[in-house]
Amino acid sequence: MKKIIFVWDNFGPIHNDRASAVAERYPEAEIIGLELYSRSETYDWIPEMSESYKKITINSVKKESELSIFFKLVSLCLKNKGAHVFFCHYERWYIFATALILRGLNFHVYVMNDSKFDDYERNIFRELIKFAFYTPYNGGLASGVRAKDYLRFLGVPKDKIKTNYNSLSLSRVRRDSSSVPAPNGTKFQDRYFLIIARLVEKKNLFVALDAYKKYINLGGWRSLKILGSGPLKDDLISYVNILGLNDNVIFCGFVQTESVAKELGNGLCVLLLSTEEQFGIVIIEAQAMGLPCIVSVQCGARDQLIRTGVNGFIVEESNSDGVSLFMRMLCENESMWVNMCDQVNKMAYQGDVSVFSDAVHALVSE
């Protein structure tokens, strides 16, 4: 029996989608999920699992040392001799060491990554060290075109790199929303703008608020909901007060994925103007509910998922004037918005978790 192992930091809803999709695609295989920690340090989501695969949490009770995690990880992998093992977090020494050991024992090891070369300024010496960290891998799963090219740059064989690592279950999002994708469902005039992001510097939220203020100054009237938590919350609330947008901007805090889906069911458009964004999984969530997106050029997801003027807009991350213009267009022109929603629905399959299972199938079948 073929065995496929996925190693992730924590199994949130998206990881559960992916492991479940592979289990559905490979009913004759044993799918194992190795969860390094029972809770995520980055996201407050509730860990999930499905009966379609076996999930094992390595550090479930207390904060164990990385050395302890390393021994447990190696031991669990060795119990599944000949497995295909997919690793995230290549930069952690215990992941690198485990991958190196398994490769030496003729396991098939793959790296999963969404980084792009243009995420930030690169240092040649750091890239050389990173190149060494990628040496154990037979192949990789990249999130998109630029991420695939970066994996190739780091030494992963070009013909062993598949795309569409970042994906989720469109059907789950639609089910959680208790609604139907736009342009159906909530009436056009009752919809609002959405930002779904951690409240951190790279999400470029102050520029997003500047753009929203300009949209209001142009006669806009729709509210803006911000879903997410983070260290910039108080600063952002103060900035909203300075801009005089207290009655327009609603901070909802962190919400679980089901509530995100419900908000998307009532949204008009999602904004993601990050200065650094390896992918932007929220774009897939938005497209699951038929919503066009306004995204920055830095967002990895825009390579495959966004076509300007067709199902959304791509804009420079500092171009608040351009963002406000696109917001105004979507707000006032219902026929344009409906056409965009129709195009979103036609193209949304590209972010569905089925493309992830296809990529895994392609790698393990070679």
Image: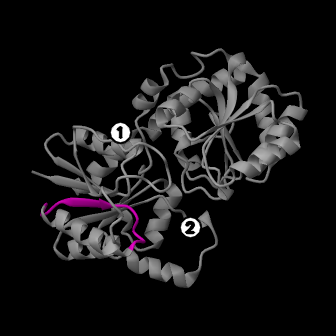
Residue depicted at x 82% and y 25%: 221
What's the mark number on residue 297?
Answer: none
Q: Is residue 320 at all visible to an observer of this figure?
A: yes
Identity of the amino acid at label 1? Answer: Ser
Q: Quadrant of the C terminus?
A: bottom left
Q: Which residue is mark 1?
A: 354
Is residue 245 toward the left or the right of residue 24 in the image?
Answer: right
Q: Is residue 219 magenta?
A: no
Rendered view: 314 above or below 202: above
**How many labels, in total?**
2
- Magenta stretch, main secondary structure, is loop
Rendered view: 236 above or below 193: below
Residue 241 percent across, percent down from the top left: 84, 42
Q: Earlier in the sequence, mark 2 or mark 1?
A: 2
Q: Secondary structure at mark 2?
A: helix
Residue 253 percent across, percent down from the top left: 61, 40
Give the magenta-colored segment's residue range. Answer: 80-92
Residue depicted at x 69% and y 18%: 190
What's the mark number on residue 117?
Answer: 2
Residue 305 is drawn in which quadrant?
A: top right
Q: Secondary structure at mark 1?
A: helix
Q: Residues within 10 Å of mark 1 (few under 14, many from 20)?
A: many
Residue 23 percent across, percent down from the top left: 23, 42
